[in-house]
Image (cartoon, rainbow, N blue to C red):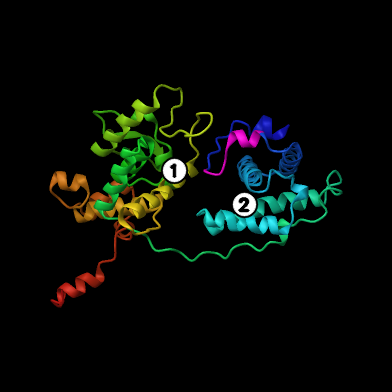
Amino acid sequence: MYMSNTLKKKNVYNRFYDESKWNNVPNFNKDLINDFLLELKAQGKSKGTISQYFNDLRIICIYIHDELRNKEFRQLKKKDFRNMVLFFKDKGMSNARVNRLKSSVSSMLEFASNEEDYEDDIEINYAGKVKGLQKESVRSIVFLSWKEVEIIYRELLNQERYQEATLLALAIDSAGRKNELHQVLKDSITPDGNFTNEVLGKRAKKFKLMYNDMTKEAFKLYMEQRGEDDIESLWITSRGERRKLDVDGLYDMVVSWRKILEEKTGEYKEFNVHSLRHIALELLSTGEHYMAKKLGKKFDLDSLKLLAHHESIETTSGYLKDRSDDMLMEAFNLN
């Protein structure tokens, strides 16, 4: 079968995916997915595109398993797909991500409705009749204070969520992008070191991420908890068979911290893994960051540019809070 031979070893992590549940998915659904993937291959689609479809369709199968009594695709109606869209939206998925899931299943059912082997089973593409969610407007960056960062970090340690504490610490230390953080290898973090292995950033630029005391503290606890394994990556799945964590798993971790902050402060903030890059640079620039306090300094734009691996000072400046109003207030003695 195509999906077992070609995509079986792909690392799929998502808070909605569960390997044991996937094993219980009806054969009809698995066969349909397999035939659809073969069609995509025949059309010359890239391995990356086919893998994306496979991952999306597996997530949908887990939803059907949990919410729709593990029905076959041929048993589903329009309301089932409408409810699916609302379900994933309510679980915190972005509109774009929900629409991609709907598009994946709609494309498969469109294939089935025009395929001789399935035309008696799936005559109508009900998923295609469900409207997608509206495109979201660009959100403003959400910043956290050092106190809020520390609240999340300490609670992760208290709950023994050491891998997540390591992610938070490394993001705050390095100001790395999600894809850069995802490339870090566990052996590259040492008690005496300050730089990770080389990662590939934007525009194929290669560099190492910096880490300091906070990362070392969390990492030590994480490695003691994790124990020995042959996975090189710093990040591993927390459920089912242990394997390298998919990059989307980092996003899911960070989103889950919103609940911690809300429970501890009473305020809900929609920060995500990209927000941490802005937060790290902002805290270093204001002197709130623990390393800024340790060194007794505020970091200037030139230093922040080097840390963030930006091409220009202007880009780095754009990652910080807009203080123009505060400057005007101060200039006119209106504080």
Please name the residue that numbered disc 1 is placed on: 250
Percent coordinates x, y for residue 127 in the rendering: 71, 56
Left or right: where 120 falls relative to 250:
right
Relative to 35, is 139 above or below? Answer: below
Q: Does the magenta stretch include residue 22?
A: yes
Q: How many numbered badges does the structure rendering display?
A: 2
| Amino acid on which the number 1 mark rests in the picture | Leu
Question: In the rendered view of the protein, which quadrant contains the N terminus?
Answer: top right
Local crowd size for mark 1, using a 10 Å CA cut-off: few (<14), some (14–19), many (≥20): many
Please name the residue that numbered disc 2 is placed on: 101
Of mark 2 and mark 1, the one earlier in the sequence is 2
Secondary structure state at the residue bearing disc 2: helix
User: Is 137 or 180 nearer to us in this picture?
Assistant: 137
Quote the CA–CA distance across marks 2 and 1: 19 Å
Q: Which residue is drawn at 42% across and 48% down?
A: 256
Pointer 2 and pointer 1: residues touching (CB < 8 Å)?
no
Percent coordinates x, y for residue 133 in the rendering: 59, 63
Relative to 250, is 334 above or below? Answer: below
The magenta region covers: 15-23
Q: Residue 98 carries which label?
A: none
Relative to 38, is 325 above or below? Answer: below
Question: In the rendered view of the protein, which quadrant contains the C terminus?
Answer: bottom left
Secondary structure state at the residue bearing disc 1: helix
Relative to 311, is 236 above or below? Answer: above
Q: Which residue is drawn at 66% across and 54% down?
A: 103
Residue 187 shows in this picture: no
Residue 51 shows in this picture: yes
Percent coordinates x, y for residue 132 in the rendering: 63, 62
Percent coordinates x, y for residue 161 in the rendering: 37, 37
